[in-house]
Every structure is written in structure tokens, then in C-alpha cells.
Image: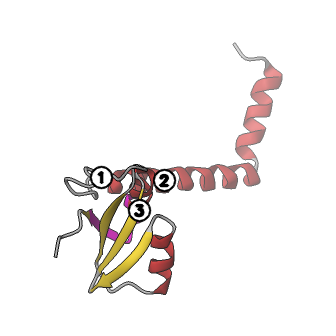
Amino acid sequence: MPSPTLRRAARGAVRNTALRRIAVVVLLVLLYQGWLSVQAIGKAGPGVGADPDERGRFAVDVVLDFPPERYHVLELQKHGRIAGTTGNVVHLRGTSPAGVDALAREYWIETITVPQEG
């Protein structure tokens, strides 16, 4: 059984507005991160990363729901080399498995696929 001093301190912490606000912010951040993880499931199509080069990197096509703007290209550039765009698709080369995981967590990315030949 907790001591009366500990119980009093716990009640004081619950009543403290600043601590409640911090707890709410922490909870919201954790919920947002959880949502990003859940929505990332299944974004990478079959065969992504199946043919890596000697450094373990590979090419991917990142499909968006809209034409990419400068911001999106700069963000994608963090995870590979931009090889061009075709409509709503950005072609990335030299992407690592960790890069694909990071890309899948971006809410504005629709899917990540193996590049089409030709």
C-alpha cells in the first residue's frame, strides 16, 4: 500500500494542469505514430527490394495521389536518387530497405512499387 505522502503527490500531479497538458500531448504524439505505423502496412508492393545491388539498394517507384511538388521531391530525395517523374509517379534509385520503411510511413504516399521496365 502506497504511503500517504505518495498518494498526495499523485493526486497533486493529476490536478496539475501543466502535467495534464504534457500527458495529452505525449498521448497524441504516440497515437499519431501508431497511426503512421498502421497505415504503412501494405504500402510496399510485392517484389520491392527483391533485386538489390551489391550495396543492398534497389530502385522503386513511389506512387502519389497527386502530381508531386518541390516539397515531395525533396522529401523523397532523402531516401534515394530521383530518376524522374511520370505523372503521379516519382522514380527513385538507390533506395535502402530502411528508406522504403520510412517512405511507407509518409501519409501522402499511396504505394511503393517495383519500377516498370521500358
Quadrant in which the C terminus appears? bottom left
Q: Residue at x 32, y 83 (%)?
A: 85
Question: Which of the marked residues, 2 or 3, is nearer the chain's N terminus?
Answer: 2
Q: Tell me residue 20's x, y (percent).
A: 68, 50
Question: Which of the marked residues, 1 or 3, is nearer the chain's N terminus?
Answer: 1
Foreground of the two, 90 or 83:
83
Query: Crowdedness of circle 2 by 10 Å Cα count: few (<14), some, many (20+)?
Result: few
| Res 12 → quadrant | top right
Residue placed under numbered mark 2 in the picture: 33
Quadrant in which the N terminus appears? top right
| Res 102 → quadrant | bottom left
50 in relation to 66, above or below: above
Give, as a three-letter code, the residue at label 2.
Answer: Gln
Give, as a three-letter code, the residue at label 1.
Answer: Gly
Residue placed under numbered mark 1 in the picture: 49
Q: Tell me residue 45's x, y (percent).
A: 22, 57
Q: Tell me residue 18's x, y (percent).
A: 75, 54
Left or right: where 80 falls relative to 59: right
10 in relation to 25, above or below: above
Query: Crowdedness of circle 3 by 10 Å Cα count: few (<14), some, many (20+)?
Result: some
Give, as a three-letter code, the residue at label 3.
Answer: Gly
